[in-house]
Image: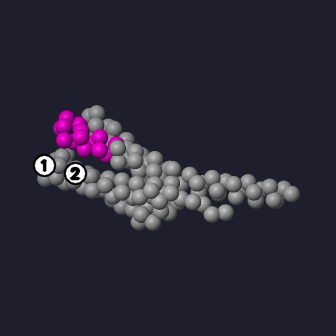
Amino acid sequence: MTTQLNPRLRFVAGASLVALIVLCLVWELKAAPLRPGGSLFVLKVFPLLLPLRGVLKGRVYTMQWAAMLILLYFMEGVVRAYSDPVSMSVAMAWVEIVLSAAFYFSAVFYVRPAKRAARAKKREARHEAAS
C-alpha cells in the first residue's frame, strides 16, 4: 500500500515556513524590533531552522513535530497582535498568525494520508495475528 502525499500541501508548508523565518528576521532586526537597532529576540528564528530541511523534503515525522512547534509562533503572534503598542509590530504579528496557521494546516493535512495508512496497516497486522 503506497500513500499518496499532496505535493501542493508540502509546497505551502515549506513556503510558509521560509516566509515565517524571513518575517521574524525582518521584524526583530529592522521593521519593529523590541529595542532600537534590533534585539536578541531575533534568536526565535533558530527553532524554525531545525525542521526546515525535513519540511522541504516532505518528511512526515518532521512535519508532525514542526506542526506542534509552529503553535508557539501562532501564540506569540496572537499575544503581540493584541498587546504591542507599535502598529508595525501589530501588522507583523498578524502576518505571523497567518503564516503559522498556513503551515500548521498544510502540515497536518499533508501528514493525514500517511497516518491513515499506518493505522490501516496496524489494524491489518492485528487482524492477521488474531486469525
| Residue at image mark 1 | 36
Residue 9: x %, y % from top left = 45, 54
Residue 81: x %, y % from top left = 28, 37
3 with respect to 52 (left or right)? right
Q: Nearer the viewer, residue 15 or 93?
A: 15
| Residue at image mark 2 | 28
Query: Of tags 1 and 2, which is closer to the observer?
Result: 2
Rate crowding at label 1 as few (under 14), some (14 to 19) or many (20 or more) other CA atoms within 10 Å: few
Residue 24: x %, y % from top left = 27, 52
SS class of the residue under badge 2?
Answer: helix
**Residue 85: which quarter of the image?**
top left
Residue 117: x %, y % from top left = 64, 56
**Residue 90: which quarter of the image?**
top left
Tell me the chief SS of the magenta region.
Answer: helix
The amino acid pointed to by label 2 is Glu
Q: How far is mark 1 from mark 2, CA to CA?
A: 10 Å
Taking the spot 53% from the left edge, 54% from the top edge, the residue there is 111
The amino acid pointed to by label 1 is Pro
SS class of the residue under badge 1?
Answer: loop
The N terminus: image quadrant: bottom right
Q: Earlier in the sequence, mark 1 or mark 2?
A: 2
Q: Is residue 85 magenta?
A: yes
What range is drawn magenta here?
A: 84-97
**Residue 14: which quarter of the image?**
bottom left
Taking the spot 53% from the left edge, 59% from the top edge, the residue there is 5
85 with respect to 126 (left or right)? left
